[in-house]
Image (spheres, rainbow, N blue to C red):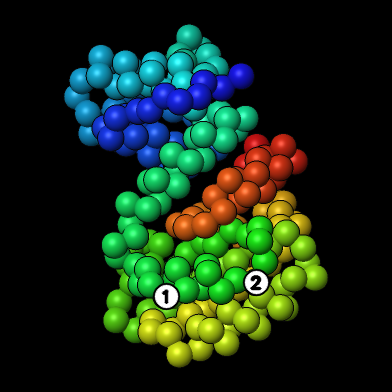
């Protein structure tokens, strides 16, 4: 049972950010200190303790060392990940992205930004990689047609990809490298984060990154 209605500080949110970078990795306190460039063991320990108490993370013990990882059964952790993704919104063509979100002709979907904009390495002529994940395969063509038409004159140019939830899950579970795995490795989730993370949870339960 996860804890509700508790908040963490901005600095503690940066601890959560460590887990956002590699969703399937386990971290020791010293690992987190190194990534955050923090010298205070006690501060990191107490921050991790608070996040653990909120059920945002879980721990296991190996060779006497506690290792922490995200709690896939607590949807609140995915909301914090969304907050972290929105830290980069000011660097994105947000008006265009909001137009795409508002014009998407289905109720349930996830929208991710990939490519150079997700890496914060975009240049003047970079395309904006937009990935939309819909619930039903039958909606793919309709969504693509509507958004492709809406975005055709946008600057930067939109490189649009639309997949069903099932197709994206299948790409993650396929052994070969593919576009879905590239999106997983590098993305900003700007709409429908919980739905996206549920796909990852299902993939994890079926052996992805295990």
Tag 1 secondary structure: helix
* Residue 41 shown left or right of residue 150 in the figure: left
Q: Is residue 65 above or below residue 2?
A: above
- In primary-sequence order, the first of circles 1 and 2 is 1
Does residue 199 appear in the picture of this structure?
Answer: yes
Asked whether 157 or 34 is in front, the reply is 157
Rendered residue at 34%/84% (across/down): 125
Q: Is residue 18 above or below residue 50?
A: below
Q: Position of residue 144 (x, y in %)?
A: 65, 78
Give the residue at mark 2: 105
| Position of the N terminus by quadrant | top right
Asked whether 17 or 100 is in front, the reply is 100
Asked whether 61 or 2 is in front, the reply is 2
As drawn, the label of residue 96 is 1
Q: Is residue 166 above or below residue 80?
A: below
Rendered residue at 52%/79% (across/down): 159
* Badge 2 density bin: few <14, some 14–19, many ≥20, Cα 10 Å: some
Q: Position of residue 186 (x, y in %)?
A: 47, 57
């Amino acid at each position: 049972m996860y804890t509700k209605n508790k908040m963490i500080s901005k600095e503690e949110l940066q601890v959560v950010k460590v887990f956002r970078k590699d969703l399937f990795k386990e971290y020791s306190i010293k690992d987190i200190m190194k990534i955050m460039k923090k010298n205070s063991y006690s501060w990191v320990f107490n921050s991790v303790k608070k996040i653990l108490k909120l059920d945002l993370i879980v721990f296991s013990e190996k060779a006497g060392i506690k290792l922490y990882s995200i709690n896939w059964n607590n949807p609140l952790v995915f909301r914090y990940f969304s907050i972290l993704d929105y830290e980069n919104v000011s660097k994105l063509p947000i008006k265009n992205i909001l137009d795409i979100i508002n014009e998407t002709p289905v109720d349930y979907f996830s929208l991710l930004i990939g490519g150079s904009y997700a890496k914060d390495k975009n240049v003047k002529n970079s395309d904006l990689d937009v990935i939309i994940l819909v619930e039903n395969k039958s909606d793919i063509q309709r969504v693509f047609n509507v958004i492709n038409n809406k975005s055709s004159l946008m600057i930067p140019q939109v490189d649009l990809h639309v997949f069903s939830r099932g197709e994206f899950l299948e790409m993650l579970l396929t052994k070969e490298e593919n576009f879905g795995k590239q999106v997983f490795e590098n993305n900003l989730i700007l709409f429908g984060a919980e739905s996206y993370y549920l796909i990852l949870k299902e993939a994890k339960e079926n052996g992805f990154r295990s």
